[in-house]
Amino acid sequence: MTTPHHPIAIIGGGLGGLTLARVLHVNGIESAVFELDDSPAARTQGGMLDIHEDEGQVALHAAGLYKEFRALVHPGGEATRVLDRAATVLVDNPDDGTGGRPEIDRGQLRDLLLGALPENTVRWGAKVTGVRPLDGGRHEVELSDGSSFTTDLLVGADGAWSRVRPLLSDAKPAYVGISFVEVDLLDADVRHPVSAEVVGGGMMMALGAGKGFLAHRETDGSLHIYVALAVPEDAFDGVDFTDTEAAKAYTLGHFSDWDKSLRALLADTDGPLTPRQIHALPIGHRWERLPGVTLLGDAAHLMSPFAGVGANLAMLDGAELGQSLAAHPGDTESALSAYEAKLFPRSEQSAAESAANGTLMFREDAPQGMLDFFASMAAPEAGEAG
């Protein structure tokens, strides 16, 4: 049987891989995306994303989808609050429509990208089990169903635990010292009005030393909450998260002296608690140029979420890689070199910022670090007004 060949194979159908496929399509270049999920609806895609003017929005312009994106933006989603553990509101910035980081549901954004690709671009249920280099910069990719294919350009857009990354780098993600427990409050305005009021219309951060609640309002009226804990890597090993009440009791135990309205964000959850350890690649992760393969998004620069740039960078990576390939027809290596020359310094700066923000948010005098941050952001505006 003949082994299928794809000139460009993108491993991973997340936002970065789909952006790359779309920008290539806009430029008349065919690609194939291999995604381990069985279908677009195989799992929920997470919560809200703020799409930055200088990153994600640049990618959407390159993809020819900016107008469609604007139609999906969540009004009011850029509102931001900072509280202390007594639920005192210390920062309350409303969304006045002038911000540069509009919010969109991650699932709607993924659907927008999927709908803008030719039929059969994405191969669903394609789990990669192995990759190996061939002659001339080509690679062979093996799938869990026993099939395989070859490609001239292999792009690892397959996330934190990338199967493609080991071709280029020995680096592995490491625990950053913070774990999340994710919960949801459904139909919040009706069923959880106090929590809805605490969170407000956009993003809320209630911070203390080594812990906090990070919450945002979703387009379906629910609240998605990340309960953050600075705990050892093995802290959850003895917690049975399939037992919702036991997991809830364990997590609430970290907030015994916090205001009741904040504890309710966890205590009143409408479903299971999902534990999630936060990992990151080394700041400044990079690799030597190897013919026929590159990385984007978390596969290239997994970082903690405290700069809020992960999805934005993945999309910008995908757009810039697609544009670089279009600008260097017939010279893939020059295209990859040009792409990586911009990728490495940008991702190093963002990873350093994210790590610094994580320290800032949960330090001993929290939430003072975030209060100082917002004050510094407002200072230039005050100067201009004077």
Image: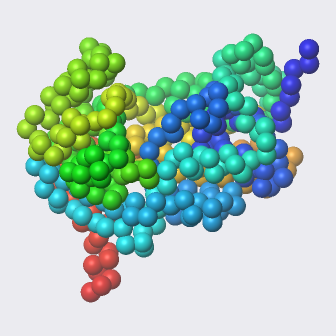
Instruction: Return the x and y of residue 61 as percentages of the image width and height.
Output: 65, 62
Considering the image in quadrants, where does the N terminus appear?
Answer: top right
Q: Position of residue 283 (x, y in %)?
A: 44, 39
Q: Quadrant of residue 37?
A: top right
Considering every residue shown, the one lying at the far bottom of the view is 386
Q: Between residues 16 and 286, which one lies in front from this camera angle?
A: 16
Q: Residue at x 28, y 46 (%)?
A: 191
> Would residue 251 appear left or right of 377 to someone viewing this image?
left
In the depicted view, which residue is nearer to us: 351 or 46? 46
Q: Residue at x 63, y 51 (%)?
A: 112
Colour style of the rendered protein structure? rainbow
Say which residue appears at 51% left-offset and 47% top-offset. Answer: 106
Could you say where residue 183 lies in the image, as x and y percent from the top left? 33, 36
Count of numbered marks: 0
Side (left or right) of 48 relative to 91: right
Answer left or right for 16 relative to 191: right
Can residue 40 be seen at all in this image of the molecule?
Answer: yes
Q: Is residue 168 above or below residue 220?
A: above
Q: Residue furthest front?
A: 190
Above or below — where is 239 with respect to 365? Answer: above
Image position, residue 11 (x, y; %): 67, 32
Q: Residue furthest right?
A: 2
Q: Looking at the image, which is closer to me, 148 or 72?
A: 72
The quarter of the image holding the C terminus is: bottom left
The foreground one among 24 and 37 is 37
For residue 175, which quarter of the picture? top left
Q: Taking the image as drawn, is residue 346 in sight?
A: no
Q: Residue at x 69, y 25 (%)?
A: 126
